[in-house]
Image: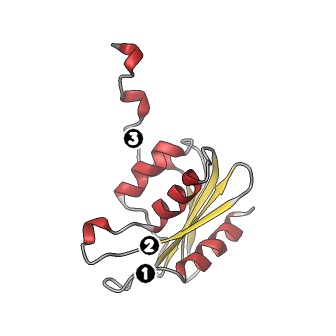
Amino acid sequence: MTGKELLSKAEEARKNAYVPYSGFAVGAAALSKDGRVFTGCNIENAAYGVTNCAERTAIFKAISEGVREFAALAVVADTAGPVSPCGACRQVMAEFFEPDMPIYLGSMQGAGIQTEIKSLLPGAFTSKELKHKDDY
């Protein structure tokens, strides 16, 4: 699947966003290595802290279906330039994505770029930094 096709899936997912407070709808599509696409949208809540971003919705949906290996991610919003994931989403991406995996960031106006998690979150905190029970 091309980046453009994955961005199109993210645009479709964006239509389901629940954004009564910000009005800022975001869609995401995660491509697993086995070729399945998991879409997500942002879901707001009156208690803003429990709002969930589109990227995390798509990734968590895939994880809940047993996916552990991803091939690409696309994110799109109605922004002037390519939308950028928040810090929480970048940390989740660092947990599940290979450092060089393609991440496509787009806008409803057609702007788009390709990047990867190592560029979005350099120096990410990962499981490599954690002591495992075998280390004690």
Residue 101 in the image: state x and y as whole percent.
Answer: 60, 48
Q: What is the crowding at mark 3: few (fewer than 14 residues within 10 Å), some, or many (at least 20)? A: some
Q: Which quarter shows the C terminus?
A: top left
Q: Which quarter shows the N terminus?
A: bottom right
* Res 42 label: 2
Q: Is residue 38 above or below residue 82?
A: above
Q: Is the Cβ of the residue at disc 3 closer than 8 Å to that at disc 1?
A: no
Q: In which quarter of the image is residue 100?
A: top right
Residue 71 in the image: state x and y as whole percent.
Answer: 66, 50
Q: Is residue 2 above or below residue 14?
A: above
Residue 44 in the image: state x and y as whole percent.
Answer: 36, 75
Q: Name the residue under label 3.
A: 124
Taking depth in this image into account, of 8 and 130 the one nearest to the observer is 130
Tally of numbered discs: 3
Considering only order in the chain, which callout, 2 or 1, is on the residue closer to the N terminus? 1
**Residue depicted at x 55% and y 53%:** 64
Q: How far apart are marks 3 and 1 (CA)?
A: 30 Å
Considering only order in the chain, which callout, 3 or 2, is on the residue closer to the N terminus? 2
Taking depth in this image into account, of 128 and 109 the one nearest to the observer is 128
Q: Which amino acid does label 2 sit on?
A: Asn
Between circles 3 and 1, the one closer to the viewer is 1
Q: Mark 1 points at which residue?
A: 18
Kindly give the residue lying farthest to the front in the view shown. 65
Secondary structure of the residue carrying numbered label 1: loop
* Res 9 label: none
Q: What is the crowding at mark 2: few (fewer than 14 residues within 10 Å), some, or many (at least 20)? A: many
Q: What residue type is labelled 3?
A: Ala
Secondary structure of the residue carrying numbered label 3: loop
Considering only order in the chain, which callout, 1 or 3, is on the residue closer to the N terminus? 1
Q: What residue type is labelled 1?
A: Tyr
Q: What is the crowding at mark 1: few (fewer than 14 residues within 10 Å), some, or many (at least 20)? A: some
